[in-house]
Image: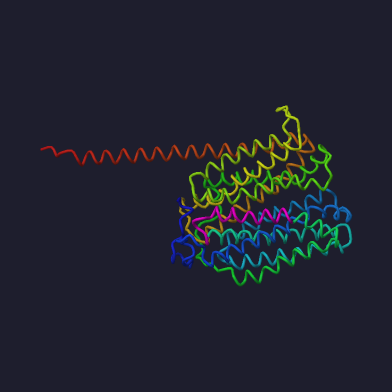
Amino acid sequence: MDTAGSPAPAGTGGDGFGGSARETSGRLSREQIYVLVSAASMNLGCMMAYSILGPFFPKEAEKKGASNTMIGAIFGCYALFELLASLVFGKYLVQIGAKFMFIAGMFISGGVTILFGVLDQLPEGPIFIVMCFLVRIVDAIGFGAAITASSSILAKAFPNNVATVLGSLEVFSGLGLIVGPPLGGFLYQSFGYEMPFILLGCLVLLMIPLNLCILPSYESDRGEHSFWKLVTLPKVGLIACVIIALSSCFGFLDPILSLFVLEKFNLPAGYVGLVFLGLALSYTISSPLFGLLSDRMPNLRKWFLVFGNLITAVCYMLLGPVPILHIKSQLWLLVLVLVVNGFSAGMSIIPTFPEMLSCAYENGFEEGISTLGLVSGLVGAMWSVGAFMGPMLGGFLYEKIGFEWAAAVQGLWALISGLAMGLFYLWEHSKTRRRSKARNLTGTEEEQAALLPNET
C-alpha cells in the first residue's frame, strides 16, 4: 500500500484520531459506520435538491421574463461559487472544524432549497432574476462547505480505503441525480412549483439532527502548507487538469444532449431522460468497483486515470459520431456510448483523490485533517471549474459547428489530459528505475571495496 493508504500516526499532531483509523480488523467500527451514514445522507439529499430544477425551472423562469442566456447563467453560477467555496473552506477547514462545516453546509443547502420554492411569488423581471442568482449562489456555498468537509472526514476515518469509500458513496450521489429530476417533475405536475423545493429542502434539514448526534468530531493542528504549494506540484497539477476535463465532459452534455436527441431522433420529451439514465447508472455502478480496485491494487490507479481519459475521448468522438468517421448516427449507438462513458468516468474520476493525496504526502505534507482539507477543497474546486466551463463551451460550439463536431472537440480535451498524464507516469517510472540502478551500483561498489584484501 502506498503513502495515501497508510494511516495517520495515532496520537500525533493533535489529530485525536483513536483506533478507528487503524482499520486493523475487517469489520467497520461504530464510528466509521456513523461517518458513512452521515456522508451518504448528505450526498443523497443535496444531490436530489440540486437536480430537481432541470425538468421545470427553465419554463417557470421564462414566464418571469428570464432569457435563455440568463437561465443558463443561473445554472452556471452554482459551479462558479462552489469553486470559490471549496478553495476557501478547504484552506480553513481546521479553523472552522470539519463537523461544524458539514452541518452548517447542510443547513444552508436545505434552507435555501425551501427559499427557492417561494421565488415564484416574486414579481417578474429583475427582482425575480436577482433573487434566483442570490439563492443559487448561497446554495452553492453551502454545498461546497458540506462536500469539502465530507471528503476530509471520510479520508480521515478510512485512511486505508479512501477510494473504496468515495467510490461507494458515489452510488448515493448517482441515486440523487437519477431520482431528483423525475421526482421534481412529478411533484411539480401534481402540486405546483413550491412543493418539490419545500419537500426536498425539509428532507435535507431533517437529516441535520441525525448527523449532529452521530457524526464524530476530528480536530487537528493547523498545517504549514498552502493550496499554492499543493497545486504547483507537477503531478497534482496534471491530475487537476484531468478533473477539469472529466467534469467539463459531464457539464458539456447538460444543455445540448437533450436538444440533439429531440432533433435527431424525434423522441418524445419524456423519453429523453432515459437516454441520460444510461450514463448515470453505469457511473453509479462502476464507481464502487473502481474504488475497491484502486485501494486493493494502488499501482493500477495511474493506469485507470490514463485509460479512463482515453476511453472517454473515444466515447465523445462516437457520440455524434464525428463526421470524418462516416458512421451513421443511431439511437442505440448513442445510448451504448453513454453507458461506456459512465464506466470510463468511474475509472478515471475515483482514483484522482487518493492519487493527489498520495502525492501530497510524498512531498512532505503532514498526515492530518489539514492536508485532507486542502486536497478535498482542490478536488472540489477543479470539478467546479469543469462544471462551469463545460456547459458554456458546449452551448457555444453547438451553435457554431453542431453537436457532432462539438462533442469531438470536447473529447479532444480528455484525450490531451489522458496522454499528458500517461507521459508523466512513464517519465516518473523511468526516473525511479534510474535511481534504483544508481543505488544498486553504489551498493555493489561499496561491497567490492569492503571485500578486497588490504594491500601491504
Q: Give the position of the C terminus as an image quadrant.
A: top left
Which residues, given as a range, are shown in magenta?
Answer: 156-179
Is residue 234 something that shows in the picture?
no
Lateral position of residue 442 relative to residue 87, left or right: left
For this view, does 234 lie left or right of residue 243?
left
Please count the marks in the image.
0
The residue located at (52%, 62%) in the rendering is 157
Asked where in the image residue 263 lies, by quadrant, the reply is top right
**Image position, residue 389 (x, y; %):** 70, 46
Q: Is residue 215 magenta?
A: no
Residue 243, how many percent across, how many down? 61, 46
Residue at the spot 67% in from the left edge and 65% down from the top edge: 106
Find residue 240 and report its horizontal and vertical position in percent.
59, 47
Residue 398 lies, in percent from the top left, at 77, 38
Magenta residues: mostly which secondary structure? helix
Residue 144 versus residue 433 in the image, above or below: below
Identify which residue, 7 or 456, lies in the foreground: 7
| Residue farthest to the left, as pictured | 456
Depth check: give the residue in front, 451 or 195: 195
